[in-house]
């Protein structure tokens, strides 16, 4: 041991060299005694390192008995983006361990991608590209029969967490009126953010563009079911970039096949999307393979955030860049790991 705080590094399903640049990884080693277990998946390796660990970067299985043997542990840093149910969070919090997440690293990338998808739905950009390649393009007015402007459109957001907060300023130049449904936030918080607090029903029925930005929890599986989707205005544009579990995909496909509205979809109940999935043949949907957040700049920002906050904590200061998990919420998430 070097006398420096010990950091146990097992970032799976994330990869070390994806989230740490060479310079950032060097910084981590300069600051801490790094026990790198990326290539050692054995439980015994974690058990041997835990008693001395100041922080865990990654989210290996941490039941209560394991955590009780980690008396020096101050932080569990999830670097994948989702809090998994393989940690006894109650024990961690009782021992004064901070549970930290990197979800904010992806927010800007997802927000920009969501805006791009909305513009595609408004103007049929990728659909027009396919038509040109197939030799079936239509010019000028004939190719714009269902085109609309995002400017001054009525926009709804379902959820106003990291993604909603990152998307809101990107919409400002379009002079959109934005209403938000988020049962976890008081109306005053939404009003301070310049959006209109709204019910789910009004958010869906009174919006031309609807961004689904809600996380998956134990309570909201498939809450955007057929009845909810039927509230969307004819010709509305639905952008789904958060979690597949919040939507009934069978009901969504049925309505898209009927041409009720258009949708852009980046997340799927099963990934990779099965070859025979009926969504693949829809012309009323823009399809994306879970690409919104996972760009190199987002990944490497995670490593920077980890180094910054662990250095602060080693000096007895609180973390400021990573997201601190709330004990009341962390066990309610039902997000699946991203491949």
Image (cartoon, rainbow, N blue to C red):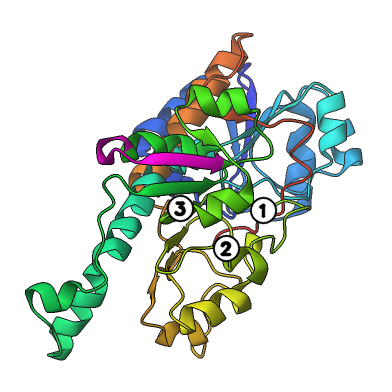
Whether residue 101 is visible to the viewer of this picture, yes or no, is: yes
* The residue positioned farthest toward the right in the image shown: 65
**Percent from the top left, x then y, of residue 131?**
19, 83
The residue that mark 3 highlights is 207
Q: Are the residues flagged by discs 1 and 3 in contact, CB closer than 8 Å?
A: no
Q: Secondary structure at mark 3?
A: loop
* The residue positioned farthest toward the left in the image shown: 140
State how far apart marks 2 and 3 are (Cα): 10 Å
Q: Residue at 38% of width from left, 53% of height from top?
A: 114
Nearest the eye: 2 or 133: 133
State how far apart marks 1 and 3 are (Cα): 22 Å
The residue that mark 1 highlights is 216
**Percent from the top left, x then y, of residue 225?**
66, 67
175 left or right of 328 in image: left
**Is 178 a magenta residue?**
yes
Question: Crowding near pointer 3: few (<14 within 10 Å), some, many (20+)?
Answer: many
The residue that mark 2 highlights is 231
Question: Crowding near pointer 2: few (<14 within 10 Å), some, many (20+)?
Answer: some
Disc nearest the viewer among 1 and 3 = 3
Whether residue 225 is visible to the viewer of this picture, yes or no, is: no
175 left or right of 246 in image: left
């Amino acid at each position: 041991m070097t006398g420096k705080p010990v950091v146990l590094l097992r970032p799976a399903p994330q990869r070390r060299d994806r989230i740490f640049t060479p310079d950032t990884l060097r910084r981590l080693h300069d600051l801490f005694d790094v026990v790198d277990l990326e290539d050692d998946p054995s439980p015994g390796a974690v058990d041997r390192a835990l008693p001395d660990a100041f922080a865990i970067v990654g989210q290996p299985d941490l039941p209560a008995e394991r955590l009780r043997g980690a008396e020096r542990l101050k932080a569990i840093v999830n670097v994948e983006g989702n809090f998994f149910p393989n940690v006894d969070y109650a024990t961690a919090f009782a021992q004064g361990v901070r549970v930290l997440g990197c979800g904010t690293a992806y927010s800007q990338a997802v927000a920009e991608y969501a805006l791009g998808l909305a513009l595609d739905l408004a103007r049929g950009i990728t659909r027009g590209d396919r038509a040109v390649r197939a030799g079936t393009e239509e010019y000028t007015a004939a190719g714009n029969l269902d085109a609309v402007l995002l400017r001054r459109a009525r926009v709804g957001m379902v959820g106003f967490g990291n993604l909603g907060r990152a998307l809101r300023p990107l919409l400002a130049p379009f002079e959109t009126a934005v209403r938000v449904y988020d049962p976890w936030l008081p109306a005053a918080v939404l009003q301070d953010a310049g959006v209109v607090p709204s019910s789910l029903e009004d958010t869906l029925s009174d919006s031309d563009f609807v961004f689904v930005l809600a996380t998956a929890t134990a309570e909201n599986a498939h809450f955007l079911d057929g009845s909810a989707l039927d509230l969307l205005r004819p010709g509305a544009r639905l952008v789904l970039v958060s979690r597949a579990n919040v939507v009934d995909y069978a009901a969504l496909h049925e309505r898209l096949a009927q041409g009720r509205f258009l949708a852009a979809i980046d997340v799927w109940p099963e990934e990779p999307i099965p070859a025979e999935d009926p969504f693949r043949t829809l012309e009323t949907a823009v399809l994306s393979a879970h690409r919104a957040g996972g760009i190199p700049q987002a990944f490497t920002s995670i490593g920077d955030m980890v180094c910054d906050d662990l250095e602060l904590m080693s000096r007895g200061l609180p973390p400021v860049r990573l997201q601190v998990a709330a004990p009341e919420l962390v066990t309610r998430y039902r997000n699946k790991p991203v491949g």
